[in-house]
Image (cartoon, rainbow, N blue to C red):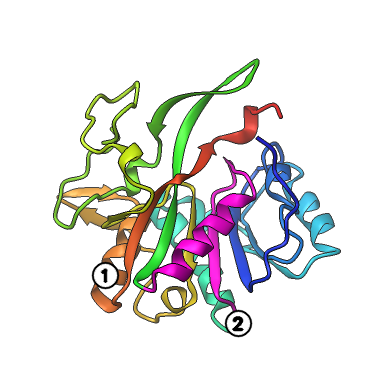
Amino acid sequence: MNINNKPIKRKILIGMLLRDNEKSIQYQLDIFKNIEYVFLENGSKDKTPAIIRNFMNTRDGLIITVGNTLKLDKLDRITRISQLRNQIREQVISKEFEYMIILDSDIFFSADIIEKLVNKMDMDSKIGVACAYGIAYLPSENGIKTNNHYYDTSALIMEKNESSYYPKCVFKGCAECGIDKYDPGNFQSFEVFSAFGGLALYREEVIKNPNVCWSPVTYNNSPMSEHIGFFMQMHEHTKYITTINSDCLVFWDVSTLKI
């Protein structure tokens, strides 16, 4: 698969959290010519800050730095990431845009994924967040060898009040989990209660809603992903739904991927 430098004639932001991502960040820079990047750099020890500063010399966007991360690093992971994601949200509230991509820094995807997600949301005004279908992979000499494991199981709740299957995924064809409850081949857009998958497209109205933010949450007596907290609030305070889109395939952990 190749990443194409393909312009999309829409006002779209990309929000990314970065820390020590020099091995993966190059895959995600300059994918599109006219998308504005918003980076939050939080304590990298490698060349990540220099890479993004050089990149932003010729691009519109914003680099947010958190300074001393000592207090943040004492927090549990979900609370820390919630605070960081919300810093990005606070910085973009005053901006004008149609959609915002929230992207993990170790995700590989082809350029047409964003266009597919935009088209889906354009066609269905009920969708507030459209998530890519993120799977784990094993590097091989021929490129990608996948075990079809949907990796972001900590964010996935298929239906309201349904239990989480974390750390197992629920999709048919996974060579690791074997639950086989849902067949991704049967849907291109499937409504779920909560998901993320490493890359998701958010409608402006969702990002800017003052009652919706990323937050740590206990779900069925277990601490869960900040994304579940986000979607619990979104469902309570907006009319929007969330979808997983199996025809928008992305791969987790590009740091070892050879293109």
> Where's residue 70, x and y in %?
55, 54
Q: Quadrant of the N terminus?
A: top right
Separation of disc 1 and disc 2 at Cα?
23 Å
Please report whichever mark, 1 or 2, sits nearer to the chain's N-terminal start.
2
Q: Is residue 148 above or below residue 7?
A: above
Q: Position of residue 43 (x, y in %)?
A: 64, 51
Q: Residue at x 61, y 55 (%)?
A: 42
Q: Nearer the viewer, residue 70 or 95?
A: 95
Count of marks placed on residues: 2
Q: Residue at x 61, y 69 (%)?
A: 12
- Examine the structure image and report whether residue 139 is included in the region drawn in magenta: no
Q: Which residue is mark 1?
A: 235
The range drawn in magenta is 96-125
Question: As drawn, is 224 to the left or to the right of 162?
Answer: right
Determine whether, in the image, residue 245 is placed left or right of residue 94.
left
Under circle 1, the secondary element is helix
In this image, 213 relative to 66: left or right?
left
Observer-nearest residue: 73 or 20? 20
Quadrant of residue 64 within the rendered picture: bottom right
Q: Position of residue 252 (x, y in %)?
A: 52, 37
Label 2: which residue? 96
